[in-house]
């Protein structure tokens, strides 16, 4: 006799996760229990109750499956008059901290993004991107872009400076919910002119920048030269990515620098353990970075090291800050992370089989270790070492469910009541893009 077909555990887990998510979004609640009926009443109503419950459960499961397949505005949409493409995404986070009860979970919209793009007849791309980030409205990328014969891809306007593998890549494609604390040392968005090009295995980006809009609560000042040079080594075991980064910025008088980073958990209680505040006399900063990454089928790893050197006037001592992270990931379902040679970053994960209400999607697990040290001489911005574990379920190219566990292994923040402790948080996210 043939053995009955069994549902794989991964499919059962994904089905349960989708049903739970849909239930939360639909507003399912736990009903209070009712007094137990008498034995005679139980005997009379048991068959009917069982039949009713089975039918109700079947309808509930069907409703949850339908909800898990909803994709409003999928693929974005075109405006009828301007013939522009509109896209966007939303990230909804829930976090719980070790010093709070399980019922005290914070729920917030981490990011809500809307972009509009239009290609002119002259070959220039007009691009605008605005976000609500933790309740703050920010303009992100607002630029003109064109591919040229001699300078590669030229970008004019407010844009991300080419520095760092995580920082230069899209926030939507990061393996973990938040970038590592190393982003405290990386430059943010600025107004300027940049070029990206490649020759063989070499890929480079460079640009000249001035001030910019507020980005993740940070604002650049002064003028800067920033560049990134990457080398891609292709082997039978997958590509290796190696890169160096450099940036020099002169802020000018009365434009003191500030370095800060959230503790790899955006839904914090307001404490940025890493925060130098305004550093007196810091009118020039030089940044250095090293990058390495490798993808071998479903396995991948990547690491970065950064330093920031501040030259100060008025007799203040110069400062040196440093940071690094390293992580590894495994796509359990066999997919592979997409490496984009156009700008030497990683693209989105696309499942081999999309979620269909019963199974499908891509599963990924990852672990990361990071350290950032902003303590030097008279500046005590904090030193933090974190260990993070993450799991991602990519239902399709539009929907991603993720969970991270982040724990501080070492926290040296003089004057902060959390210094010397080991705070931890569990964070979940629903991400939908169209």
Image (cartoon, rainbow, N blue to C red):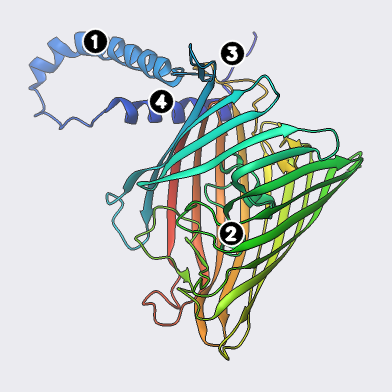
CA separation in Å, label 4 and label 1: 20 Å
Mark 4 element type: helix
Q: Residue at x 45, y 56 (%)?
A: 217
Q: Which mark is residue 317?
A: none
Query: Upstream in the sequence, badge 1 or badge 2?
Result: 1
Q: Which residue is mark 1?
A: 52
Q: Nearer the viewer, mark 4 or mark 1?
A: 4
Q: Nearer the viewer, mark 4 or mark 3?
A: 4
CA separation in Å, label 4 and label 3: 24 Å
CA separation in Å, label 3 and label 1: 28 Å
Mark 3 element type: loop
Q: Is residue 420 above or below residue 170?
A: below
Q: Is there CB contact under 8 Å for labels 4 and 1?
A: no
Q: Residues within 10 Å of mark 4 (few under 14, many from 20)?
A: many
CA separation in Å, label 2 and label 3: 52 Å
Q: Which residue is mark 4?
A: 19
Q: Residue at x 38, y 48 (%)?
A: 134
The answer to whether residue 108 is left or right of residue 332 is left
Q: Residues within 10 Å of mark 1 (few under 14, many from 20)?
A: few
Q: Which residue is mark 3?
A: 4
Q: Nearer the viewer, residue 14 or 409?
A: 409
Question: In the rendered image, is residue 434 in sight?
Answer: no
Q: Nearer the viewer, mark 2 or mark 3?
A: 2
Query: Upstream in the sequence, badge 4 or badge 3?
Result: 3
Q: Is residue 370 above or below residue 427?
A: below
Q: Which mark is residue 183?
A: 2
Q: Nearer the viewer, mark 4 or mark 2?
A: 2
Mark 2 element type: helix
């Amino acid at each position: 006799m043939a053995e009955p077909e069994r549902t794989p555990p991964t499919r059962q887990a994904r089905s349960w996760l989708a049903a739970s998510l849909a239930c939360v979004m639909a507003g399912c609640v736990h009903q209070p229990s009712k007094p137990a009926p008498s034995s005679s009443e139980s005997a009379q109503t048991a068959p009917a109750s069982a039949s009713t419950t089975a039918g109700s459960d079947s309808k509930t499961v069907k409703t949850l499956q339908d909800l898990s397949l909803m994709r409003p505005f999928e693929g974005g949409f075109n405006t009828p008059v301007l013939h522009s493409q509109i896209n966007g995404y939303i990230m909804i986070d829930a976090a719980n901290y070790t010093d709070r009860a399980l019922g005290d979970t914070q729920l917030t919209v981490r990011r809500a993004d809307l972009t509009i793009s239009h290609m002119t007849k002259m070959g220039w791309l007009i691009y605008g991107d605005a976000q609500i980030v933790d309740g703050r409205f920010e303009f992100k990328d607002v630029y003109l872009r064109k591919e040229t014969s001699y300078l590669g891809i030229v970008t004019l306007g407010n844009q991300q400076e080419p520095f760092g593998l995580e920082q230069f890549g899209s926030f939507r494609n990061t393996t973990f919910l938040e970038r590592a604390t190393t982003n405290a040392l990386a430059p943010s968005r600025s107004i300027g002119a940049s070029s990206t090009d490649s020759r063989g295995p070499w890929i480079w980006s460079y640009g000249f920048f001035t001030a910019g809009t507020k980005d993740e609560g940070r604002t650049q000042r002064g003028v800067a030269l920033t560049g990134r040079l990457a080398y891609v080594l292709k082997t039978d075991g997958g590509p290796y990515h190696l890169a160096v980064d450099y940036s020099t910025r002169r802020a000018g008088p009365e434009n003191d620098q500030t370095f800060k980073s959230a503790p790899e958990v955006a839904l914090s209680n307001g404490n940025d353990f890493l925060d130098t505040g305004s550093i007196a006399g810091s009118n020039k900063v030089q940044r250095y970075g090293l990058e390495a990454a490798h993808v071998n089928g479903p396995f991948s790893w990547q690491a970065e090291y950064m330093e920031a050197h501040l030259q100060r006037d008025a007799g203040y001592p110069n400062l040196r800050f440093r940071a690094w992270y390293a992580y590894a990931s495994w796509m359990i379902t066999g997919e592979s992370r997409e490496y984009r040679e156009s700008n030497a970053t990683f693209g989105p994960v696309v499942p081999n089989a999309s979620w269909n209400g019963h199974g499908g999607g891509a599963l990924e697990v990852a672990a990361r270790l990071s350290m950032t040290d902003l303590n030097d001489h008279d500046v005590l911005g904090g030193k933090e070492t974190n260990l993070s574990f993450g799991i991602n379920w990519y239902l399709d190219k539009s929907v991603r469910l993720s969970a991270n566990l982040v724990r501080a292994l070492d926290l040296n923040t003089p004057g902060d009541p959390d210094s010397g402790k080991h705070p931890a948080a569990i964070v979940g996210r629903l991400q939908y893009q169209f």
